Image (cartoon, helix red, strand yellow):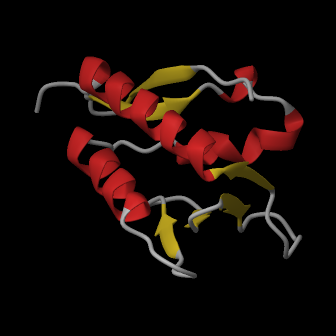
Amino acid sequence: MKYNFKKNDFLLENGEIYYELGVDGESLDNDIFALSYINWEGWTIEEAQMIIDASKSLTGKEIYDYVVPGNELTISIDKEYVYFFDWRTSQEEENFSWTFEEFIDFMEAFKDFISKNRPAD
């Protein structure tokens, strides 16, 4: 599971800079490329923590689905596995999956990245 976090900045026509936080698509193997669609300008520490908390509070056969705003990436979480679905592809099954622990580790590291890279409002 290889990925690198990245802060993408874009210069808008009006001169403003627009930021997205996520992962560097060039750092991803093809089998987890759908993870590149986690990039979003709205990421906050609180949003990442909300996903972690909601995931850890699952019991039994509950499933928590998170859709990255503005993207077609759905993350479907249960207590054992986490499935990533890029709805831009024609396949109906997940694009890839991680164990629950791998996902929580990713989200904790992503939350730390957000805290260090979130532009001041």
- Identify the image quadrant of residue 111: top left
Query: Height in image: 20 above or below 37?
Result: above
Q: Is residue 63 left or right of residue 110?
A: right
114 vs 53, nearest the viewer: 53
Question: Residue 101: x percent and y percent?
Answer: 58, 44
The residue that appears at 69% across and 61% down in the rendered structure is: 83
The residue that appears at 50% across and 21% down in the rendered structure is: 6
- Identify the image quadrant of residue 24: top right
Query: Height in image: 44 above or below 70?
Result: above
100 vs 1, nearest the viewer: 100
Question: Residue 50: x percent and y percent?
Answer: 29, 56
34 vs 75, nearest the viewer: 75
The residue that appears at 54% across and 59% down in the rendered structure is: 71
Q: Quadrant of the N terminus?
A: top right
Q: Is residue 12 visible?
A: no
Q: Is residue 91 left or right of residue 115?
A: right
Task: Name the outermost residue toward the front.
Answer: 60
The residue that appears at 37% across and 56% down in the rendered structure is: 51
Query: Height in image: 53 above or below 48?
Result: below
- Identify the image quadrant of residue 88: bottom right
Question: Residue 56: x percent and y percent?
Answer: 40, 58
Q: Quadrant of the C terminus?
A: top left
Question: Residue 29: x percent and y percent?
Answer: 83, 30
Q: Is residue 56 visible?
A: yes
**Number of numbered markers:** 0
Task: Name the outermost residue toward the bottom.
Answer: 61
Q: Is residue 103 left or right of residue 9?
A: right
